[in-house]
Each structure stands twice: as C-alpha cells, then as structure tokens.
Amino acid sequence: MANSAVICLSNVHCVVLTIQGDDTMGMTIPQNTCPACRSARRKRIPAVNAWDGIEWQHVRCSDCKHRYLELYPSDEQLTRMYDKSYFSDGGGWVCGYWGGSYESNERHLRDEAVRALRDIPVKRGRILEIGCAGGFFLDEARVAGFDVTGVELNPEMAEHARTKLGLTVHCGMFEDVGLEPHSFDVVVVQDVLEHIRDPRAFVTSVYKLLRPDGCFFVRGPLEQQAKEGVYLALRSLTGRGNRIVKEPPFHLQGFTRHSFAAINNSAGLTPRTFSTDATRPAMKLWGAKNAAATVIGYAAFLADKILGRGDFMTATAFPVRPVSSDIR
C-alpha cells in the first residue's frame, strides 16, 4: 500500500514523498514508468548526478519526451538535500543563477514576483503559493490586491514570511495544514514541479484546492532547448560517455510542453497558456573551444527563439470539469 505526502520546502522545491509499505525512509525508489504520461518506453541520456555514493541516471520518455531519474532519492536523502544550507550563499536554491543567499536576493525575487503577477490572468481573490519560501512573491501579491496564503516546510523561511512580512504562512506538509478545498482563485508554484517525485499526485492535490474557475499558475525549467539537445547529441556521437555532475539530483523531473499537459490532463486541468523563454548564452571568444561553444550556443539560442522553445516555461491551467473532492 502506497501512502503519499506532499512536502513543500521552498519556492524552489516541493517534494511528494511516496512511502511503499511501512518504512522506506532510507531506501531509494525505482521509477519504472514516465511520471508524466506513464509510458514504460524510455532511453538513457548521457547525464548522471553522482552523490551519496550513487550514480543517478537520467532517462527520457520515448513518448512525451519527459526527463526523469531511473532512481529517486529516499525520504532521508531528500531531507539532507534540502537542509538549512540550501538557502545559503552557495546553496542550490537558485541553481547558481545569482550569488548570495535567498534573503540577500530580495530585490531580484521581488522583481520576478511583479513579472509573474502580470502573467496571472486572475487579478483578484484568494491566492495560494505552494512552497513560498520567505514570502517575497506573496508580499507583492498582497500589494496587488490578493488575499494571500502560503505553505512552507522550512521553519526559518516560514518564520521570515510571518514575522518580517506579516504573511499568513503555514509551516508543514502541504496535505496536512488544513487548507479548505475549492477555496482558492489561484494556486501558484514557481520552480517547484521539477523537484517532485510524483507530479501527477501533486497536481491532483492542486486541483482539489481550486475553485471551479480557478487558475493553476506555473513557472519553472523547461527541457525543450536546442542547446542542451545539441550538447547531449555531440557527447553521444563522440563517445564521451555520461556527463557526470557531482551534486545531488535536485531536478527529479524535466518537463516538456507535452509532459506538462499530461500531468494536468490526468488531474482534470487543461493548459490554457504556455510561453517559453531561452537564456542568452555568455560570450566566450578566447580560444578555439570557447569560440566554437559560443557559436553553437548562439545558433541554438536563435533556434529556440524562432521555434518557441527554450529553458524556462510560464504556463496556466484551468479545471475542465466540476471540481470534486472525491478524486482518488
């Protein structure tokens, strides 16, 4: 018998812990089918995370092109991956895009929040952020006129949101904090889905919280980028083997447009908007290797722009049938 609990640790990670039997706190969990479309057809890609004495092999679904791991971390490993250091300077909370800690990047995070609020089609009502971290997005949403609520497992982040910003933030597991079903006009997850072991179960839980005309708003990494595809293809063709990254496998999932639609459709939601963004590569022209990498990177960047692909997505989904609390 499998029991699931959705744990929201921050605005950059939220984890569904699925416990098989009585006790698998210390056991890794094999993933035999695609978490998005449930297909068993897949291929290994030359990407591995090496951490905790395990090589975490990445695979890609042959049907919806979703990327996931052959083996998922145990509950105990997830706890260590997302410990207090995660939000510190040099922690994994922002994948190296900015330097400094979460709190020292308040200006960046507030600017992102304002941009995100522009993309949410619902402009008033009750908004819930799952994995709200220190609360900067919710604070901006409150200024914009929303009635705001957050969920955050990390005690330090939840305390920051409550005491420094005066926000209503529940500290605990998503399913255990007593949120009223069908009570939110908007549910927001930002940089969250890629950290979840069972995204279909997570989105089903979101569906139960939405009002019949509510909006599920998502921002996060996207797998459909030409640069990564070219890099992995060249690595395979040249026989260089796996790219080994010596850090925890923070991104358990890698979404495509199709796999994002699959997890929403399975929960009774349908995507309404889906936009992409591509990161402009750095200019490194010294040395033949750097110059070649820059040329390839810019060609891939332009291809992504033209084809509407990239490395980041912003999407909305809405209920397609009357919301029911009886979904299993």
Image: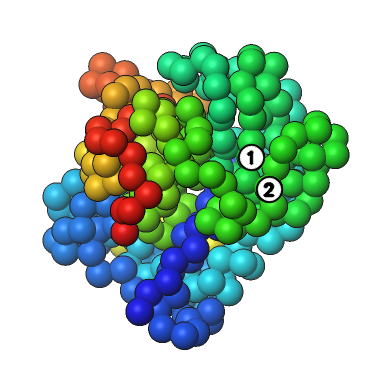
In the rendered image, the quadrant that contains the N terminus is bottom left
**Which quadrant of the figure has residue 294?**
top left
Image location (x, y in percent) of residue 114: 60, 17
Above or below, comparing residue 267 to residue 236 in the picture? above
Looking at the image, is mark 2 or mark 1 earlier in the sequence?
1
Work out whether residue 234 can be spotted. no
The C terminus lies in quadrant: bottom left
* Callout 2 crowding tier (Cα within 10 Å): few <14, some 14–19, many ≥20: many
> Considering the numbered disc 2 on the image, is that residue within a helix, a strand or a loop?
strand
Q: Read off the residue under disc 1.
A: 150
SS for dot 1: strand
Q: Which is more toward the observer, 180 or 253?
A: 180
Q: Indicate the position of residue 277 as horizontal and vertical percent values.
A: 40, 24
> Type of residue at label 1?
Gly
Residue shown at the point (31%, 19%) measured from the top left: 305
Question: Residue 293 location in percent, x, y?
Answer: 39, 34
In percent of width and height, residue 80 lies at 63, 67
The residues bearing labels 2 and 1 have C-alpha atoms spaced at a distance of 6 Å
Q: Nearer the viewer, residue 293 or 41?
A: 41
- Total residue callouts: 2
Q: Pick the residue in front: 30 or 172.
A: 172
Toward the viewer: 328 or 312? 328
Asked if residue 36 can be seen in this view, the reply is yes
Pointer 2 residue? 170
Q: Quadrant of residue 82?
A: bottom right
* Residue that extends furthest to the right in the rendered view of this protein: 163
Residue beneath the point at 35% across and 62% down: 69
Q: In the image, is 84 to the left or to the right of 257?
A: right
User: Which residue appears at 74% of the width and 46% of the height?
Assistant: 158
Q: Amino acid at mark 2?
A: His
Q: Residue at x 28, y 30 (%)?
A: 271
Are dots 2 and 1 in contact, CB under 8 Å?
Answer: yes
